[in-house]
Amino acid sequence: MTQNVIWKTSPNRTVGRGGVAVDRIVIHYIVGNLAACDATFLNPDSQVSAHYGIGEGRIHQYVSVHNTAWHSGNFGFNQRSIGIEHSATPERPPTQQTLNMSIARCVTLCRQFNLNPLTAIVPHESVVPTACPGTVDWEYIRDRTAAQM
Ligand SMILES: [Zn+2]
């Protein structure tokens, strides 16, 4: 399935990955909608970004997968990973549409980087102490991605 990715280039990124190969996809939640994600990642003062944001039927790309986004709170982990944000809050889980779009993106990325989704797809909370990805069922994304590979 071809996805329509809308570019919203973030200033918050490091060019390249320091020679580090991509081997992880980190699942995040926005604690808001995609518009809130745009506002944060397009603001240079926020000093944060991710490669993709998904919600409300759209997928936005903020940073090239060949560059380092600032999403996990650990620069070494950022160099080896792709970050995906999902529209959701503590009270509002992501919609099935958002989950399906994420799974399709993960399938594409796992093929592109030759990753095993069962080991590559991880929650933000596995990298640093955080409440993220909250209401996003990252194991569902992982398992459905594996089933579609
Ligand atoms: Zn996160």
Image (spheres, rainbow, N blue to C red):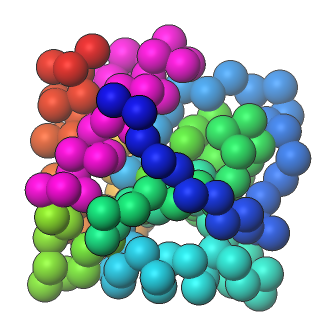
The image shows residue 123, relative to residue 10, as above or below, that is: above
What is the span of residues highlighted in magenta in the rendered image?
A: 96-119
Instruction: Please name the predominant secondary structure of the magenta segment in the image.
Output: helix
> Closest to the observer: 42 or 118?
42
Q: Quadrant of the N terminus?
A: top left
Q: Name the residue rendered at 16%, 19% in the picture.
A: 147
Image-quarter location of ligand 1 = bottom left
> Closest to the observer: 42 or 80?
42
Can residue 60 be seen?
yes
Q: Name the residue rendered at 16%, 30% in the picture.
A: 143
Left or right, 101 with respect to 58, comes to: left
Left or right, 23 with respect to 16, comes to: left
| Image coordinates for residue 79, horizontal then vertical, percent | 70, 40
Q: Quadrant of residue 56?
A: bottom left
> Closest to the observer: 38 or 20?
38
| Image coordinates for residue 58, horizontal then vertical, percent | 39, 62
Residue 107 magenta:
yes
> Closest to the observer: 54 or 139?
54
Q: Name the residue rendered at 15%, 70% in the picture.
A: 93
